[in-house]
Image: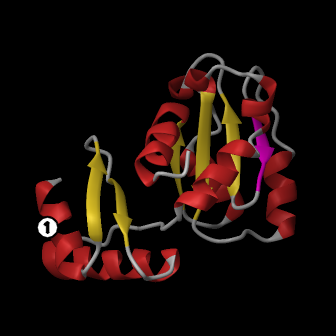
Amino acid sequence: MADLQDLCRNIGFESVETYIQSGNIVVQTHLTPTDAAHQLHQGIQNTFGLDVPTLGLNGETLREMMEQSPMQQEGIPITEQHYTLLHAQPDPTDWEKLMSYDYPPDRIIQGDQVVYVHCPNGYGQTKFTNTFVEKKLGVGATTRNGKTMLKLLEMSGNN
């Protein structure tokens, strides 16, 4: 993670913080989230020779995703909440297809470029995995648990 932090500083990002060994990075930049993600993707590719998908969100968007989560509003324990963050807006037909799946006790809820995943028995037991969502929606995604989302929100200063 130290090498990743150095790369971010070399790109020109400021106040670089990483969270655990998960690839989560919080930075300050004048770039849009999309441009920052692109810069980071290129930097990782050029520096480390890895083609790693990157997703950029600003703190406000992160806060809105959490506030708009039906799971938060229902008071579901944070340990049962997961957020599958989408790299692009899926086709409405693909959304419909994804939302037609039913694997109780787990459930998914469509958000704005996010799939809220409620897993009462843990993410390791769900069929609504990151790969499942990516295949059904035809877009790249990354999934974070509720505690990680809260920590990233705190780190962004938008909590």
* Image-based side of 154 in relation to 86, left or right: left
Q: Which residue is mark 1?
A: 6
Q: Position of residue 42 (x, y in %)?
A: 30, 82
Q: Main secondary structure of the magenta part?
A: strand
Q: Residues within 10 Å of mark 1 (few under 14, many from 20)?
A: few
Estimate the x, y position of residue 47 in percent, counting from the top left: 14, 77
Q: Determine the image quadrant of residue 109.
A: top right
* Image point (87%, 45%), residue name: 100
Camera sees residue 49: no
For the point 23% across and 71% down, the residue is 8
- Amino acid at dot 1: Asp
Residue drawn at x 81%, y 59% is 95
Residue located at (19% from left, 72% from top):
9
Vertical arrangement, residue 3 with respect to residue 149, above or below: below
Q: Is residue 115 above or below residue 12?
A: above
On the image, the x and y values in percent for residue 20 come to 28, 40
Q: Which residues are magenta?
A: 107-111
